[in-house]
Image: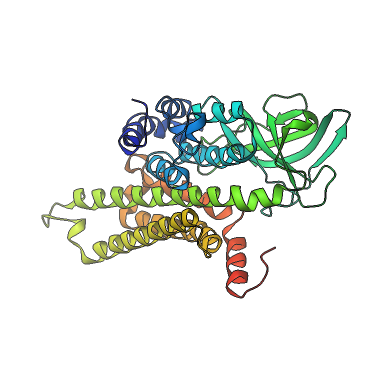
Amino acid sequence: MIATQDTFSRVLDQVASGVVAAEAIAVDRDGVFPDRSIAALRSAGLMGTVSAPEVGGLGMGFRGAAEVVERVARECGSTAMVMCMHFSGTAVLEAFATDDVRRAAASGEHLSTLAFSEAGSRSHFWAPTGTAGRSGDEVRLTADKSWVTSATRAAAYVWSSRPLEAEGLSTLWLVPAGLDGLSVAGPFDGLGLRGNDSSPVSARDVCVPSSAMLGSDGGGFDAMLQVVMPMFAVTSAAVSVGFMEAAVAKTASHVREARYAHLGSSLADLPTVRNYIARMRVKTDSTRALLWDTVAALETGRDDAMLRVLESKAAAGEEATEVLDLAMRVCGGAAFRKETGVERHFRDARAAGVMGPTTDVLYDFIGKAVCGMELF
């Protein structure tokens, strides 16, 4: 079944509880890209959740994107992160790309991603050190991108560089994967999100046409702040909420089933255990409430929308690690076994705090905003 706005949630749940859930353990165990899960999301029309109806998308914006990645994250963090980056890249394409590219992104034929982070600017992704130089009718790009999700699977990268000729911090480009001069530095072998295909990508005099520019020369910073950051923060927070929901469900299931045979009671009969699970539930619900308030702020153009964007990613990343810590504590030795399912979410949840902008950088921004200071 292909999703419509009316059937969206039902189709999403079918795909997540079916193919995505079935593939999740192997994706994590083997560190392989979730090809079947992405194909299922594509077939269901969910890759076009944020794309406009005029190009074949669902036009469901931040709310739809958050719902997709949160539901998918309950089953597979790697698949959720691929979708998070696809929606973040697609938001840029919706704002600046040609209709044929937008239509391909909406159908899922064009898997999108961001290529922003660089070793030289680290988590300050808005200030790339990579260069762009004119060469006749073409532009030559040179950079070392430190982390690119879907590095070998994306159809093209939403790429940042220093401005070509204008003033400003950055310019954005659409760079098709596979161009001469592009290289991916090998498979990802990490602690968590093991199937998200996140690898360094280097460009050495990669030639793209001037028409590959997304937006204006020097306008990359504004696009990052106004287009990319809201979508990335919302979907990143939604991924964390998905991990938290999975942790609460799996922990509650474990304590109901784990029993003291000689006492005829379960772990759930212990007030201390129930206290821990209550704290997990409260943290999850509080984080979800902040996420949906952020979405509402963006949808209505509230004055506090950017503050909420910053808060949602920071809070979700922090709370997810705390909830998964509690899950590991409550489930005890069983949590270390793969079949319980908790340790996979425990590992995956750690990524949010170190993805640029990192939680520490976000706290600095939030503090500046509260003190009435300029963020950048």
Quadrant that contains the N terminus: top left
Please say if 198 is above or below 335.
above
Q: Outermost residue, front direction?
A: 54
Q: Outermost residue, right direction?
A: 136
- Residue 244 left/right relative to 311: left
**Residue 269: percent from left, percent from top:** 17, 60
Quadrant that contains the C terminus: bottom right
Viewer-closest of 25 and 181: 181
Residue drawn at the location 37% of the way across and 47% of the way down = 342
**Residue 53 in view of the camera:** yes
Viewer-closest of 256 and 89: 89
Residue drawn at the location 48% of the way across and 31% of the way down = 30
Q: Outermost residue, bottom direction?
A: 371
**Residue 6: percent from left, percent from top:** 32, 36
Please say if 53 is above or below 120.
above
**Residue 17: percent from left, percent from top:** 32, 34
**Residue 32 in view of the camera:** no
Total marks drawn?
0
Please say if 338 is above or below 335.
above
- Residue 135 left/right relative to 216: right
The color scheme shown is rainbow
